[in-house]
């Protein structure tokens, strides 16, 4: 087996215990939320007999270990359970809401990469004023909370200029133009901080690479600064940038919860917040599990891409 094949196999196998530990954590942490989900679901009908019957029907009267084994067994068969309030299958609800969260995350990260990486490269090779301007953007982008920025964007573009809708959602397949109009403000809200992080990371990685001896050698050979940056320095800085992009995708998935609430997007984050308020254990478990599993898979893909970009990573793992 080659070193790269061993690297890929090792990374894939490492995700299995991570997914298992994550499932245990999700299962247990939900039970620390105060309140009885059955009494919340029954409302004024929450008599002792009704509560006992519903708890028995939902297997909430069983020991935690038995509940966990039953839950994992259902997961392995593709059954995420049922919503305690609507009694709808959670697999159907997630199939409807997950595309919204994925679209928001994908568009936000794409915008952050397209803006942050070129600005980071420019900041690394530019002059004093370029450095100052990018430093100011990084400080503001990282410091401003998402919810405050989202409110300010709504007041400006929806309240004052009235050029974009303040909230709502329409699927891309129904009306692509209207879908992008609804997604513009949420994407700008999420992408601003990520752009600042990527700008700072790219600038630091490029500055480190440009100080290496081989760059001095390339300059002595007479290569133009553009060829050195685009053909050599950026390639060597890419593993660091890709690693940060993978990490920030997880941050975006977490930040999507706040943004979906703010802009009334029917995504997984908004579903989780509603389920927490209702003490809806199965829905919270399913939503958090899906988001966490996505983050683990993104981390796996990031490791594989970094190993492909930097052969030293895969060779070291294989050894």
Image (cartoon, rainbow, N blue to C red):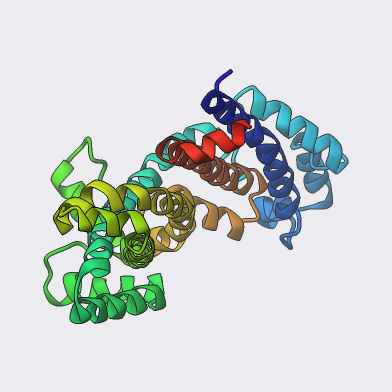
From the image, which quarter does the C terminus lie in? Answer: top right
Q: Is residue 103 rendered to the left or right of residue 226?
A: right
Number of marks in picture: 0
Q: Position of residue 60 (x, y in %)?
A: 79, 42
Q: Residue furthest right?
A: 63
Among the 4 quarters of the image, the one containing residue 11: top right
Q: Which residue: 74% across, 44% down?
A: 24
Q: Is residue 109 rendered to the left or right of residue 59?
A: left
Among the 4 quarters of the image, the one containing residue 118: bottom left
Q: Position of residue 51 (x, y in %)?
A: 78, 48
Q: Position of residue 170 (x, y in %)?
A: 25, 46
Q: Which residue: 23% across, 64% down?
A: 119
Q: Is residue 129 above or below residue 267?
A: below
Q: Is residue 102 rendered to the left or right of residue 281?
A: left
Q: Position of residue 117 (x, y in %)?
A: 28, 58
Residue 169 in view here: no
Residue toward you, 29 or 124: 124
From the image, which quarter does the N terminus lie in? Answer: top right
Residue toward you, 30 or 196: 196
Q: Is residue 209 above or below residue 28?
A: below
Q: Residue furthest top?
A: 1
Q: Is residue 70 rendered to the left or right of residue 167?
A: right
Q: Is residue 298 above or below residue 318?
A: below
Q: Which residue: 56% across, 26% down?
A: 3
Residue 186 in view here: yes
């Amino acid at each position: 087996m080659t070193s790269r094949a061993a690297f890929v196999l090792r990374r894939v196998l490492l995700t299995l215990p991570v997914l298992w530990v994550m499932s245990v954590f999700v299962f247990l942490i939900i039970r620390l939320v105060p309140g009885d989900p059955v009494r919340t679901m029954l409302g004024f009908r929450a008599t002792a007999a009704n509560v006992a019957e519903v708890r028995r029907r939902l297997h909430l009267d069983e020991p935690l270990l038995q509940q966990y084994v039953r839950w994992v067994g259902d997961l392995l068969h593709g059954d995420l359970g049922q919503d305690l309030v609507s009694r709808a299958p959670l697999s159907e609800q997630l199939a409807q809401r997950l595309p919204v969260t994925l679209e928001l995350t994908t568009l936000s990260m794409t915008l952050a990469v397209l803006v942050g990486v070129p600005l980071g490269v420019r900041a690394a090779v530019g002059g004093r004023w370029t450095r100052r301007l990018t430093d100011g953007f990084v400080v503001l982008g990282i410091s401003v909370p998402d919810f405050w920025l989202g409110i300010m964007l709504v007041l400006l573009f929806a309240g004052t200029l009235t050029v974009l809708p303040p909230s709502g959602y329409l699927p891309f397949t129904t009306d692509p133009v209207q879908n992008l109009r609804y997604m513009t403000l949420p994407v700008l809200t999420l992408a601003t901080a990520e752009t600042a992080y990527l700008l700072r990371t790219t600038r630091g990685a490029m500055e480190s690479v440009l100080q290496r001896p081989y760059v001095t050698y390339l300059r002595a050979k007479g290569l133009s600064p553009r060829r050195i940056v685009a053909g050599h320095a950026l390639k060597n800085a890419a593993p660091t940038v890709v690693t940060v992009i993978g990490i920030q995708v997880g941050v975006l998935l977490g930040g999507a919860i706040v943004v979906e609430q703010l802009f009334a997007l029917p995504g997984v984050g908004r579903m989780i917040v509603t389920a927490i308020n209702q003490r809806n254990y199965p829905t919270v478990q399913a939503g958090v599990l899906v988001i966490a599993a996505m983050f683990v898979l993104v981390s796996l893909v990031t490791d594989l891409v970094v190993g492909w970009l930097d052969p030293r990573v895969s060779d070291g793992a294989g050894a």
